Image (cartoon, rainbow, N blue to C red):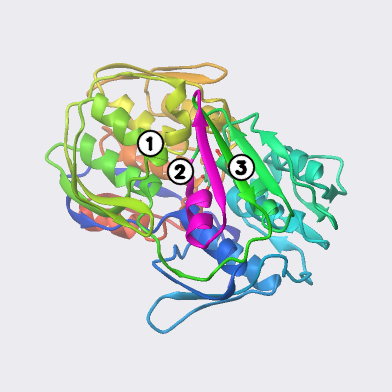
């Protein structure tokens, strides 16, 4: 099958739409789905996963797990079966591992491979090949892995350590991917692998490692999180269910807030506090979001969200909130564009190294749609208005979240907004157009 993003580009336009009404379960969480596959292969025996995200990023990780000896397949009842090789049991892949557009897939797998004495080639698409890998390669080199590349980008070849060393590493950037890469390297390293996080980031790796039986000691002191993993655990396979992705829920959520008369319910949304910064911010802006039926499933907090159209007011978003809403700034800009007053966002440096330079892409898109804003090195101010001209064509730079954010803006702007390519939406939110249309959104598509 040709991955959709290798096909021709797929421009999509969004136009002013009536109220959004109804119920939607957005696709499952991308972060948890990657980890389910990677930790599944690290167990001996079969792990069964229901509601795995079946999107391109995750399928690339599934292929990588197969290439290293795991057995990964969808079974009759829609669950995914992963039969692992156990800690330390990875097999040498015969071909380069291609992670497509996925930064999470490649960085986590670099960590997993780093403590196995084998040589693996890693590659990705043109967007992923521009993203910095040095942030994981540096600690992995301290563990003993060798990279035969003088740039810190893909494609690269990594030779894992024969005698991996446990390290104590303080994260220089707030990144769950870097934290997770080190912890995954720790799985096949004797001794205690320690990661210190000055700013806590999403903790799915730690939760899932504990669920599979690893010994973790986590302490919080003066705001810093210290995570110690005891190496070479025997991970026990288990049964997992992946909740809906709050980063995908963010798009219909903001759409319902800004389109008058909307009233929707988003079901099964994961509400892990390391991921709910957007909900906190939107509530501060006056959003009517009600959490219904909050429950715990598989170690994660889950709830249904009722979202009603709301009059929003601009706020100051503190930089300390960035890790818990790092993927949500593009769609927050859309909410801010329709709020009264200014929204100030600080601490956005990491947005420059996502699937695109998201800060620059948002600023350019806001300009094309007639939204006043001010872009700083690591900050953005958006000046909201009740009506926005729209009418622009947005360069998405192969970035699914830029694509979805501007389509949402087009549902309320005076003139339709067109994105140059909607194909990358399939990396995280397959069915976005169809699901949003079922709620009442209007899009037109044209293959080029
Ligand atoms: C992710 C961590 C975040 C996030 C990405 C998914 C993860 O990246 O932006 O979409 O699953 O660990 P960083 O860790 O680089 O901030």
Q: Nearer the viewer, residue 215 or 418?
A: 215
Cβ of mark 3 under 8 Å from ligand 1: the answer is yes
The numbered mark, 2 or 1, whose residue comes first in the sequence reads: 1
**How far is the residue under mark 3 from the one under mark 1?**
26 Å
Image quarter where ligand 1 lies: top right
Q: Marks 1 and 2: in contact by CB < 8 Å?
A: yes
Q: Residue at the location (22% across, 36% down)?
A: 257
Q: Which residue is mark 2?
A: 401
Q: Residue at the location (32% across, 25% down)?
A: 337
Q: Nearer the viewer, residue 397 or 190?
A: 190
Is the residue marked by circle 1 packed among few (<14), some (14-19), or many (20+) residues within 10 Å? many
Q: Which residue is mark 3?
A: 179
- Give the residues in magenta: 202-222
- Asked which secondary structure carries label 2, the reply is helix
Is the residue marked by circle 3 packed among few (<14), some (14-19), or many (20+) residues within 10 Å? many
Q: Residue at the location (51% across, 25% down)?
A: 348
Q: Which residue is mark 1?
A: 331
* Above-or-below relation of 166 to 377: below
Residue 255 image point, x, y percent: 27, 41
């Amino acid at each position: 099958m040709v991955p959709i993003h290798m096909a021709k580009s797929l421009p999509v336009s969004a136009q002013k739409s009536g109220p959004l009404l109804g119920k939607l379960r957005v696709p499952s969480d991308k972060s948890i789905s990657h980890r389910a596959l990677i930790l599944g292969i690290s167990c001996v025996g079969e792990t069964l996963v229901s509601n795995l995200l079946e999107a391109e990023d995750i399928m690339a990780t599934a292929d990588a797990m197969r290439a290293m000896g795991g057995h990964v397949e969808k079974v009759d009842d829609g669950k995914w079966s992963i039969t692992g090789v156990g800690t330390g049991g990875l097999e040498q892949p015969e071909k380069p591992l291609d992670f497509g557009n996925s930064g999470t897939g490649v960085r986590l797998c670099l960590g997993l491979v780093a403590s196995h004495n084998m040589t693996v080639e890693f590659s990705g698409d043109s967007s992923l090949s521009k993203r910095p890998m040095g942030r994981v390669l540096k600690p992995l080199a301290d563990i003993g892995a060798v990279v035969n590349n003088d740039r810190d980008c893909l494609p690269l070849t990594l030779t894992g350590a024969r005698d991996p060393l446990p390290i104590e590493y303080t994260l220089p950037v707030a990144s769950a991917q870097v934290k997770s890469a080190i912890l995954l390297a720790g799985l096949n390293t004797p001794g205690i692998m320690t990661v210190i996080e000055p700013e806590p980031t999403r903790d799915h790796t730690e939760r899932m490692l504990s669920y599979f039986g690893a010994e973790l000691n986590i302490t919080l002191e003066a705001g810093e999180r210290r995570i110690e993993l005891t190496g070479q655990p025997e991970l026990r396979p288990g049964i997992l269910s992946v909740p809906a992705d709050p980063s995908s829920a963010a798009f219909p959520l903001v759409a319902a807030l800004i389109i008058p008369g909307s009233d929707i319910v988003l079901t099964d949304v994961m509400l892990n506090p390391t991921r709910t910064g957007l909900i906190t911010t939107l509530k501060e802006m006056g959003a009517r979001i009600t959490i219904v039926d909050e429950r715990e499933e598989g170690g994660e907090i889950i709830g249904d969200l009722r979202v009603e159209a709301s009059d929003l007011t601009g706020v100051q978003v503190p930089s300390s909130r960035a890790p818990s809403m790092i993927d949500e700034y593009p769609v927050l800009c859309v909410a801010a564009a329709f709020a009264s007053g200014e929204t100030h966002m600080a601490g956005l440096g990491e947005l420059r190294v996502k699937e695109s330079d998201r800060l620059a892409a948002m600023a350019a898109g806001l300009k094309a749609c007639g939204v006043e804003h001010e872009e700083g090195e690591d900050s953005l101010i958006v000046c909201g208005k009740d009506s926005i001209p729209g009418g622009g064509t947005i360069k998405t730079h192969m970035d699914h979240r830029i694509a979805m954010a501007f389509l949402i803006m087009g549902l309320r702007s005076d003139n339709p907004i067109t994105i140059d390519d909607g194909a990358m939406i399939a990396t995280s939110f397959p069915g976005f157009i169809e699901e949003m249309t079922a709620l009442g959104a209007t899009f037109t598509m044209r293959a080029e």
